[in-house]
Every structure is written in structure tokens, then in C-alpha cells.
């Protein structure tokens, strides 16, 4: 009998492939620190976003896969780069003018514009932690400010001073000539103003572990590199953090991929072992452009969760992480329905198939039962024809179709009904375009009405689908999909739609007859033009 671990060792699911690659890191001996360390980074200059979710969710999937194939304990650290200077005042904070005097100060030294936390950095860190806790991620939080100030970084920072020339040689190769003239891996934090200074370093004393520089007023200062007096530029910081924490695995977006040799080299110079990397492709907007926080051309976490449950977003993140994916409103219904299709399939699958099933990775091997007896796409169409203003308007139809279902026994369906009404109102309704049927469609729809009026097969979705199919065949639609396309465009105002037999079963025989008769009378198209 194949065990879970045996199956995991040959599974082609990408989290297991990454986990096996990571396991090879310790083939000779287990880690001296006693665990395998996963890390994700966060820039707290803004609120957590969908990319933050993706990194932590995908890293967690690999972590859980690793725990199946190895007995080595694991940890996940979420590291916040909150010692970074505030380079610009965000637009979405109260009284942004008041923050201007704090530009270039570390985010943990900038007052919280919301007045709730010790600093703006502490505020955004709290948002990150609440964000991660909401999704049930298991992680440990590290603040860069605390990491630098409490001396946890001191050994590596002194080593960076000792090996300054070697690290600078790596960095200078990657910089333009004019940038090379003033660049240093160390950024002093001014003892008086508290600002992070981008100034040339006049001297690095490897023995004493100090840097000497002139501030913007021309005054000379000498500061120790330890104790939070300086911070590292972001690229050296990446590699130095790997060395300091002995990180075993970190993933990041494709936009970092050209810097990977730099991070690796600096980690090695500082006495560390480069971690295993995983580079994922970036998300695209509806025009195929890379999603940017500053442009606001993608979906936020809150926007996705306005229209669907968290698991659907996890499902989207699981799919093909090394392929650029369009992240736009219309992917949400598809993600919801595919997630529930996989949930329904899971109990009947063998262990190999289960490990390849996204829901195993979304739920760490313990997926729940799907209670979605009606698909999200069908709920959207039902909301359309029923004119539902809230989920209660859908439940009358759902109960007739599935008498065993209720909001209490089918909470995922109940939540989906509410999401569907919201999604329909905001995205489907504004785009509907009804048209009148042509002569062939009119004759076929009139025939369908008569057959439905004499129907005695109950609400059997498959039988109804067969009957609708037969009507299209008998009326000469070639290809047959043109018949269904006509039904969707005339009755639903869209070029695509559900299996029509299932729609009839859910909406009701009499209600479907009335809908078709209204369309044949021109009422749907007329209502559109007079709206």
C-alpha cells in the first residue's frame, strides 16, 4: 500500500517538487539550528496586498509539503523592512501634509497618521499581522527595527564592515557609473534628525566596525555599524538577512530574479549559505500589463474577498505560479467554481491524485466537504433573471432545486449566494446586452416553450439538458453551440452562460417559460433600451 510520504516523494504537484529540492539541502546532515527556515519579506510603506498573500500562501504550501516528506521541524518568518526611510507620503492617510517633515525617517520613527500605534511602521506591521492572522497562517513576525536595534544583526554587520570591499565589488558591477561614485552598502541614520541618509561613506573601519561620513550640512560623523546606527541598502540587506538568520527558502517575484546572483553572492561573502529560491511570475491586469501598487491596476485582497471566499483566492494562487496570470474581476467566478469542483472530486481520488489536487495544499491535507450544490456561475445567472437584491431572493429557488439545503446546513452556499448577488450587481448587470432572436432562434425558442409546458420529467437537470440539445439539433443549428449562444444572448444578455438544463432546473419550468415568452415578445430587449 502506498503511504502518504511515498506518494509525496513522486508527486508532480509543484509544492512537493520544491519540498524535495529543499530536502536535498540536508541530505548529508540535518540543519545545525534544528529546523528548516522559510522566510517571506514585507515592505511596510503600504498596506499588505494581494502579492503579500500570494507569497505567504505559496510558501506555506511548500512548507506543509516539506513536513510530509521530512521529519525536520520547520519555521516560517515574516520579516518587515520597517527600518526603511519613508521616501514619500502616502496619499491614503489622514493629514498627509503633517507627515512631510518626517520624510526619510525610518517608518518606525514616523508618527502614526491614524493615531492608533506607536508609529506608522507599527501601524502597518499591525495591519500585516492582522491580515495574516485572518487567513490562519502560522508564522513568526520579525521587525527589522528590532532586529537591528537589539543587536541580532550585529555579527553580520561587523562582518560586512570587515568584508566591505568584497561586497562593494559585487554591488558596483550592477550600478550605473554615476551611481557608483556615491554608493555604499551602509546607510547611516543621523543621530540628530533620525533620517536615513543616502550619502557617500568616507571611510569604513573594519577593525572598529565604524563608518565615517559627512551629513547633508557638511558635518563629519563616525558611527558604529551595530546597534541600529546604520542600515544596509536593500540589496545587501537581502543577502545579509539570509546569512544572519540562516534562511533555507525564500520566494519572490520575477522582478527580483536579476538580483538573485547579487543576493546569493553577498550571503556567501558574509559566511552564509544561499537559500533555495522560488521565482514566481507576476500578475497582469485586464490589458496584460504588470500589476502595480502605485498604478492601482489590479485587484486588492479586500476587493477579491468582497465577491468570494478566501479559499478561491488560495486556489488562484496555487495554479501555475511560474506562469504570468491575468488577475481581473472575471477570474473570480471561475476560481470559485473550480475550487469546489476539486473539493467534490477529492474524496473519491487515490492518494496520488489527492496530493496533486489544489485543495490538499490549500487545506494542508484536510480539505472540508463542499456544500455548493449550485455553482457560482449558476447563482450569477439566477441573480440575473430573478432580479435578486439579496441572497434571500435566491434561496427560494435554491430550496426548490435542493430541498435538503439551507443556510445553516450549507454555509458555503449561503455565503456564495450573497457574493453572487453582489458580483452580479457590480459587474454583470452593467454589461448585459439583450437582443431580439433571429427567425431560426425564434422558432426554436417557441418550440422549447411548448416542450417545457408539456414537460413531465421534474427538475432533472440532465434530462432537461438533453431536451434543449434536441431542440437545437432539430432546428438545424450548426454548430450546435450557436443555439446555446443564442439562448444566452437573448435570455441572459451575455454571450456565455450555464448548462441550460441545469439553469432550468434551478430557475424552474414555469419561470423559464415566462422568461422565454418575455424575450420573444421583445420585453427584455425593450427594457434594456428604456433603462
Image: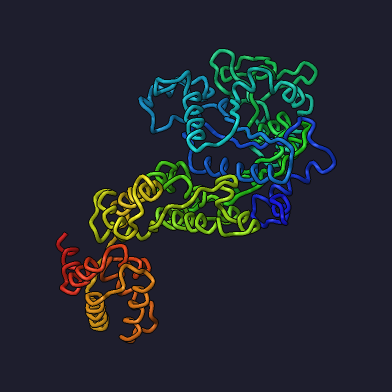
Q: Judge from the rendering whether residue 486 lies leftward or rightward of residue 197; answer left or right.
A: left
Residue at 74% of width from left, 35% of height from top?
267
Q: Judge from the rendering whether residue 208 lies leftward or rightward of residue 526; answer left or right.
A: right
- Between 146 and 25, the one lying in front of the other is 25
What colouring style does the render use? rainbow
The x and y percentages for residue 80 are: 57, 30
- Between 143 and 19, the one lying in front of the other is 19
The x and y percentages for residue 433 are: 26, 65
Q: Is residue 287 visible?
A: no
Residue 35, quarter of the rendered image: top right
Residue 383, quarter of the rendered image: bottom left
Q: What residue occupies the far right of the structure in this picture?
A: 28
The x and y percentages for residue 363 are: 55, 45
Residue at 43% of width from left, 46% of height from top?
309
Residue at 62% of width from left, 25% of height from top?
199
Quadrant holding the C terminus: bottom left
Residue 29, quarter of the rendered image: top right
Q: Is residue 185 visible?
A: yes
- Between 84 and 103, the one lying in front of the other is 84
Compared to residue 57, the image places residue 110 above or below, namely: above
Quadrant holding the N terminus: bottom right
Compared to residue 419, the image places residue 264 above or below, namely: above
The x and y percentages for residue 333 are: 41, 56
Amino acid at each position: 500500500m502506498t503511504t502518504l510520504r511515498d506518494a509525496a516523494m513522486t508527486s508532480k504537484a509543484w509544492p512537493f517538487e520544491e519540498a524535495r529540492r529543499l530536502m536535498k539541502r540536508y541530505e548529508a546532515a540535518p540543519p545545525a539550528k534544528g529546523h528548516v527556515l522559510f522566510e517571506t519579506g514585507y515592505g511596510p510603506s503600504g498596506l499588505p496586498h494581494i502579492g503579500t498573500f500570494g507569497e505567504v500562501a505559496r510558501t506555506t504550501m511548500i512548507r506543509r509539503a516539506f513536513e510530509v516528506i521530512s521529519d525536520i521541524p520547520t519555521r516560517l518568518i515574516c520579516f518587515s523592512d520597517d527600518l526603511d526611510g519613508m521616501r514619500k507620503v502616502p496619499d491614503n492617510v489622514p493629514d498627509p501634509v503633517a507627515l512631510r517633515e518626517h520624510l526619510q525617517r525610518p517608518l518606525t520613527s514616523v508618527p502614526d497618521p491614524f493615531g492608533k500605534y506607536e508609529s506608522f511602521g507599527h501601524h502597518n506591521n499591525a495591519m500585516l499581522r492582522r491580515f495574516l492572522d485572518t487567513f490562519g497562517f502560522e508564522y513568526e513576525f520579525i521587525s527589522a527595527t528590532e532586529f537591528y536595534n537589539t543587536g541580532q544583526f550585529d555579527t553580520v554587520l561587523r562582518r560586512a564592515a570587515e568584508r566591505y570591499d568584497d561586497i562593494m565589488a559585487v554591488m558596483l558591477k550592477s550600478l550605473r557609473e554615476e551611481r557608483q561614485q556615491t554608493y555604499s552598502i551602509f546607510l547611516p541614520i543621523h543621530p540628530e534628525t533620525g533620517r536615513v541618509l543616502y550619502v557617500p561613506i568616507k571611510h569604513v573601519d573594519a577593525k572598529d566596525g565604524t563608518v565615517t561620513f559627512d551629513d547633508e550640512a557638511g558635518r563629519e560623523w563616525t558611527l558604529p555599524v551595530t546597534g541600529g546606527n546604520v542600515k544596509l541598502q536593500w540589496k545587501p540587506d537581502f543577502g545579509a538577512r539570509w546569512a544572519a538568520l540562516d534562511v533555507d527558502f525564500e520566494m519572490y517575484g520575477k522582478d527580483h530574479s536579476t538580483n538573485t546572483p547579487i543576493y546569493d553572492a553577498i550571503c556567501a561573502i558574509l559566511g552564509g549559505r544561499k537559500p533555495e529560491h522560488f521565482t514566481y511570475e507576476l500578475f497582469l491586469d485586464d490589458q496584460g500589463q504588470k500589476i502595480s501598487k502605485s498604478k492601482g491596476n489590479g485587484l486588492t485582497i479586500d476587493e477579491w474577498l468582497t465577491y468570494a471566499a478566501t479559499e478561491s483566492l488560495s486556489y488562484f494562487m496555487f495554479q501555475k505560479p511560474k506562469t504570468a496570470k491575468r488577475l481581473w474581476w472575471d477570474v473570480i467566478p471561475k476560481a470559485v467554481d473550480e475550487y469546489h469542483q476539486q473539493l467534490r472530486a477529492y474524496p473519491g481520488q487515490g492518494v496520488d491524485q489527492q496530493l496533486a489536487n489544489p485543495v490538499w495544499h490549500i487545506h494542508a491535507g484536510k480539505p472540508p466537504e463542499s456544500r455548493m450544490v449550485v455553482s457560482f456561475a449558476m447563482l450569477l445567472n439566477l441573480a440575473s433573471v430573478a432580479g435578486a437584491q439579496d441572497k434571500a431572493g435566491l434561496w427560494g429557488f435554491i430550496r426548490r432545486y435542493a430541498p435538503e439545503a439551507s443556510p445553516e446546513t450549507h454555509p458555503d452556499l449561503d455565503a456564495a449566494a450573497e457574493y453572487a448577488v453582489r458580483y452580479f450587481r457590480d459587474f454583470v448587470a452593467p454589461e448585459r446586452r439583450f437582443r431580439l432572436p433571429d427567425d431560426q432562434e425564434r422558432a426554436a425558442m417557441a418550440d422549447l416553450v411548448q416542450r417545457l409546458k408539456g414537460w413531465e420529467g421534474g427538475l432533472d437537470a440532465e434530462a432537461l439538458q438533453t431536451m434543449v440539445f434536441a431542440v437545437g439539433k432539430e432546428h438545424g443549428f450548426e454548430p450546435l453551440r450557436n443555439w446555446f449562444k443564442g439562448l444566452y444572448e437573448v435570455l441572459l444578455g451575455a454571450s456565455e452562460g450555464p448548462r441550460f438544463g441545469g439553469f432550468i432546473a434551478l430557475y424552474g419550468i414555469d419561470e423559464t417559460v415566462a422568461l422565454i415568452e418575455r424575450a420573444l415578445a421583445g420585453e427584455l430587449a425593450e427594457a434594456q433600451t428604456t433603462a
